[in-house]
Amino acid sequence: MKTIVASNSEKARKIIESKSCDVLVLDLAGHDNVKKLFTIITPVIARIAQTNNIAIGINAQALKKLSSVEKASTLARLREVIKYCRKARTKLAVNLSKHEARALLISLGASTEQLTKTITQPF
C-alpha cells in the first residue's frame, strides 16, 4: 500500500488525479480563518478520490502529540473532512487499531457505512 502525505489542496488534487498512491495522508496542520477552517480536502477532491479508488488517511498518532488548543482545531478540520468523505463515499484510512479507529470516527460524525470500509493499517 503506497501512501503519500499532502500538505495543501493543490498538491492533494494532483496526487489524486495522477493515481500515484493508494492512501493520501492528510497533514492537518494549518491556519484557520475566523469564518472558515483550513482543510485540504474539498468536496471535489473527495469525489475524485472516490472515483480513482484512493483512501483518505488520517494520522491519529500525530493527534495524540498536540496541545489541547491545536487538538481542538485539528479535530474540527477532521470532522469537516469526514463530512465531505461521507457525502462522496470515499474510503478512510486510520493508523489506529480497529476499535480505536471506530470510536474516533463515530465521535467525529462518520457513518456506519464508512466504518465498514475503513482501512486500519499503520502508514
Image: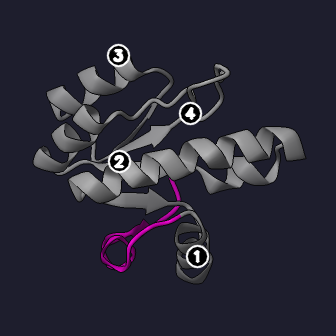
Write the residue at 22% across / 52% down.
Answer: 88
Give the image location of residue 122, x and y in percent: 53, 60
| Nearer to us in this view, 12 or 34 | 34
- Gap between marks 3 and 2, in whole Å? 17 Å
How many residues crowd around disc 3 within 10 Å: few (fewer than 14), some, or many (20 or more)? few
Give the image location of residue 44, x and y in percent: 23, 33
Q: Amino acid at mark 4?
A: Asp
Write the residue at 35% across / 48% down.
Answer: 84
Is there any visible trace of residue 116 in the rendered image? yes
Res. 27 mark: 4
| Magenta highlight range | 109-123
Q: Is residue 66 above or below residue 10?
A: below
Res. 10 mark: 3
Q: Are circles 3 and 2 on residues that touch, CB within 8 Å?
A: no
Depth check, mark 2 against mark 4: the one in front is 2
Residue at the spot of label 2: 84
Q: Amino acid at mark 2?
A: Tyr
Res. 110 mark: none
Kind of element beneath mark 2: helix
Q: Amino acid at mark 3?
A: Glu
Depth check, mark 1 against mark 3: the one in front is 3
- Gap between marks 4 and 1, in whole Å? 20 Å
Q: Amino acid at mark 1?
A: Ser
- Gap between marks 2 and 4, in whole Å? 16 Å
